[in-house]
Every structure is written in C-alpha cells, then in structure tokens.
Amino acid sequence: MQYKRFFVPIAAVLLAPVSFAQQPAEKTPSPAPVQNTAAPGPFLHLDSAPSNYMLGPDDQITLYVSDAEELSGKPMRIDMKGDINLPMAGRIHAGGLTAEQLETAIQDRLKKFFKDPEVVVSITEFRSQPISVLGAVNTPGVHQLQGRKTLFEVLSLAGGLRSDAGNKIKITRDIRWGRIPLPNAADDPTGNFSVASVTVKSVMNATDPTENIGIKPEDVISVPKADLVYVVGSVHKPGGFVLGENESLSALQVLSLAEGLDKTAAPDKAKIMRAQPGKSDRTELAVNLKKLMAGKGTDMPLKADDILFVPDSAAKSVTTRTTEAVIQIATGLAVYGRF
C-alpha cells in the first residue's frame, strides 16, 4: 500500500506530457488591440523644460510612440529648416512648436496607422542655452550650454576661478526651469527667480557632490571677488591678501603673508586702519606687533578692507643705511641712488 500511494502520482506526472501532446492544439484567438492609457514609463521628459519652450533647429528630441517600437527611443535632431522626418508620419515641421504641440502633430499623422496613438516628445538637447558666468572667472560672459552640464563643468568652460575669487558662488535661475535643488535655495522678492549659493571650497575640493547641480538655460552664475586686507610699510611683501573662506585674518597671520618685517620696521608702533561706513576717514587701532611676536598680548583680527600699517623706525633706518654704506665702500661698490 505504501508503494501504491507514491506510484500513482509519479506516473501521472510522467504521463501527463504524453497525453497532452496527443491532443490537437486549440487555436487561440488573437487578442484585441488594447488602447495604451498608461504613462509611458521611462520615456519621460529628460529635462524639465518650461512648457512654453519653442523647439528650433538643432534641438535634439527623443520620441515614445505606443505600439510603434520603430519610432520610439531613438534621438533625432531637428534639421536647419526646423523639420523632422519620421517613418509613416513623414516630414513634420517642429520649429516654433512646444513639445506638447509637436506631440499632437505627430499623433494626428499616426492616426492613419494606429488607434489613439500615444506620443511623448522628450527634449534631450536644447538649441540655444545661454548662461551667464560673471565675476572672478578667467573668461566671464555669456556661454552656450551644449547638452547637459554641471556647475563644475560650466565653471571650467569659463576658464576656472581666478585667484581673487571669493568664498561663495551664487546661482540665479528663472523659476520657469524649477527651483534650484540646494538646501539654501530661496525665491527672490519678485518670486520670478530661485537663488542659491555654494562654497568655493566645496567646488574646488569636490567635498559635497550634491552641490554640483545641473545647470539650466538662462542661469546666471556669479563669482564675486574676494574681500582683501592690506599690509603697507616696512614689510617684505606689502600688498593685498585674499580673505578667502575666512571672514577675518589676525594681525600675525597677515604679517606672515607679508613675509615678515623689514630690518627698519617699528613693530611696536603698528596700527590697523579701518574704514567706517559713510565716512572718508579711517579709524586707527594700535597693535603692538613686537609683543604679539613675543607671545604676549591678544592678537587682533583684520576684517575686509582693513589696512595693517607697519611704520619705519628712523633710528633703525639711519643705522641700516650707514652699515650698507660701509659695506659698499669696503667692497668698492657704491649705489648713490640709495641716498
């Protein structure tokens, strides 16, 4: 009984294909055409273009047509006359139409061959994509986007950042292209533009890939010049120095950038000259560099547009010039223009 219990199902399984093979196959009726009412899935608009964007020569589009694989998924470029040439649909003038209007035009042509064809036009490259890159870049001006470009790529197109570039890069976008996908993005007071910024440090070091956003046509990218502090007087390298990502530099930091004091400097009489809003005169703040260099006292911060002035010591100047004169006489060298 135990063998019979297992034998019957096994035999049935083994003999089943044979019994089915001996039966004549029934003809399955062809399914009726089904109208495709579902969204076309992957064939969506690849760029969030404004709905009123007018197609033109050299734009590249990709079509999705329900029940027509030969028309779907193949990029095509609008010719210089503004036309596209499609199988079955023939030549269609796309120039001056929006993507939605072109969809309707193609649908009307294909109704001869398909019942209620669904057409989606995706713009994959735009004909004219002016963007403005302004400020502290090597090639400022209006540039054309060819295809898709990120913020880093656009800055490269503009020749990269200059050495005097500030700490922030500002992006302004027409709200028709959507809001800028950055956490600090906000609409301007008119509500017509989205404005955001990224740090130069994150761009240069690529520390935050999410800040490398895609750039849209008509974007304005502004790179302001950096704030400077200045050192004048008895230092080895007088001039202006970029604050960069710092909002201030200490007096000793600025002195280090100026490569230290001259021999004739009077560091105990140095001062910071600071501009006052609405006033032509500067406020003078005494800073004793001699004490600071000895590790005494509190270092003072310099803000944007401050001037660190290191005066010359008259006594040191006379001593130094006399020593140089003795050396020149002893070596047979004379530089009369020095006195």
Image: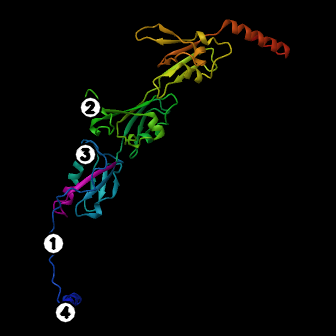
Q: How far apart are marks 4 and 1 (CA)?
A: 45 Å
Give percent across and percent down for residue 331.
Answer: 85, 17
Q: Distance between the residues labelled 2 and 4?
A: 83 Å
In this rendering, position of residue 74 left or right of residue 301: left
Disc 1 designates what residue? Answer: 31
Q: Which residue is drawn at 44% across and 41% down?
A: 207
Q: How crowded is mark 3: few (under 14 residues within 10 Å), some or many (20 or more)?
A: some
Q: Is residue 222 above or below residue 295?
A: below
Residue 16, label in figure: none
Give percent across and percent down for residue 167.
Answer: 45, 29
Disc with the residue nearer the chain's start (3 vs 4) = 4
> SS of the residue at dot 2?
loop
Q: Quadrant of residue 65?
A: bottom left
Residue placed most toward the observer, 252 or 240: 252
> SS of the residue at dot 1?
loop
> SS of the residue at dot 4?
helix
Disc 2 designates what residue? Answer: 192
Q: What residue type is labelled 4?
A: Lys
Residue 4, label in figure: 4
Disc with the residue nearer the chain's start (1 vs 3) = 1
Give percent across and percent down for residue 176.
Answer: 27, 38
Q: What residue type is labelled 1?
A: Pro
Q: Is residue 135 above or below residue 35?
A: above
Please indicate, yes or no, whether residue 250 appears anywhere in the rendered image: yes
Q: Which amino acid does label 3 sit on?
A: Thr
In magenta, the rendered stretch is 106-124
Q: Residues within 10 Å of mark 2 (few under 14, many from 20)?
A: few
Residue 98, label in figure: 3
Disc with the residue nearer the chain's start (4 vs 1) = 4
Residue placed most toward the observer, 119 or 274: 274
